[in-house]
Image (cartoon, rainbow, N blue to C red):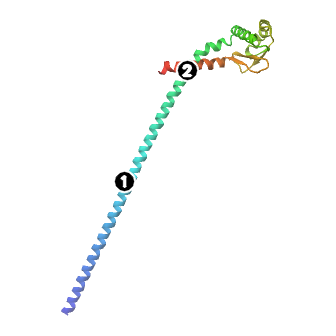
Amino acid sequence: MDKLQELTQKLYQEGLQKGKEEGEALLAKAREEAAEIVKKAQEEAAAIKAKAEKDAADYKVKVEGDVKMASTQTVQATRAAVENLIVAKAVEPVKGALSNENFLKEIITAVAQKFSAQESADLSLVLPEKLQKQLEPFVKGELSKTIGKGVEASFSKKMEGGFKIGPKDGSYFISLTDEAFQALIGEYLRPVTKKILFG
């Protein structure tokens, strides 16, 4: 009986020891796996944080670039608007003069006389339609008599002021319209205006 009890006790102790060892091995393995999971989670969190920081930095650079570009464009647009306003005000008197009947008659006569001295052909004029009533009798009468040649006049709705002149055959013409003067004067005024205003 004692032998049986001793054997039972020994088997019990061995089983207990073996279970304890297996339990400790399982626990160690679980701890190792848990540490691996934590390490992996920390690495993923660090990667996510680094990406978020990079994205935020990239977005900041992009926003700053967009704001800078918008600011530059706004300044340039404002400068251009100021230049255009000043140039438009500067050429306004010219536009007014080129719509003045008496001034136009003087200019047309002077230019037509130069043409008649150099060209043997009859002349063709294009004038603003709004001045047709005032200028048509002048062209047919006084101007033709002054230059001693035929002058054909047509009147354009598109022309605000000034005139176009050339040989009747249409081979070429010279434009002395208010648009042409405005473009010419504007071309010379813009650089000067820009320098005065913005250095």
Q: Is residue 28 above or below residue 169?
A: below
Amino acid type, mark 2: Arg
Q: CA distance from mark 2 to mark 1?
A: 58 Å
Q: Secondary structure at mark 1?
A: helix
Q: Is residue 136 above or below residue 71?
A: above
| Residue 105 in picture, x, y percent from top left | 72, 9
Instruction: Provide the residue designation for mark 2.
Output: 190
Along the viewing direction, whichever of 62 and 120 lies nearer the viewer = 120
- Whether residue 153 sits left or right of residue 192 in the image: it is right
Amino acid type, mark 1: Ala
Q: Residue at x 34, y 63 (%)?
A: 36
Within the image, what quadrant is residue 12 found in? bottom left
| Residue 185 in picture, x, y percent from top left | 60, 17
Which residue of the protein is positioned furthest toward the left in this rendering?
2
Along the viewing direction, whichever of 175 and 10 lies nearer the viewer = 175
First in residue order: circle 2 vs circle 1:
1
Q: Are marks 2 and 1 in contact (CB under 8 Å)?
A: no
The N terminus, quarter of image: bottom left
Q: Is residue 27 above or below residue 167?
A: below
Along the viewing direction, whichever of 165 and 140 lies nearer the viewer = 165
Q: Residue at x 59, y 19 (%)?
A: 186
Which mark is drawn over residue 179? none
Instruction: Provide the residue designation for mark 1.
Output: 46
- Whether residue 96 sits left or right of residue 116 in the image: it is left
Q: Residues within 10 Å of mark 2 (few under 14, many from 20)?
A: some
Q: Is residue 192 above or below residue 52?
A: above
- Whether residue 147 sits left or right of residue 191 in the image: it is right
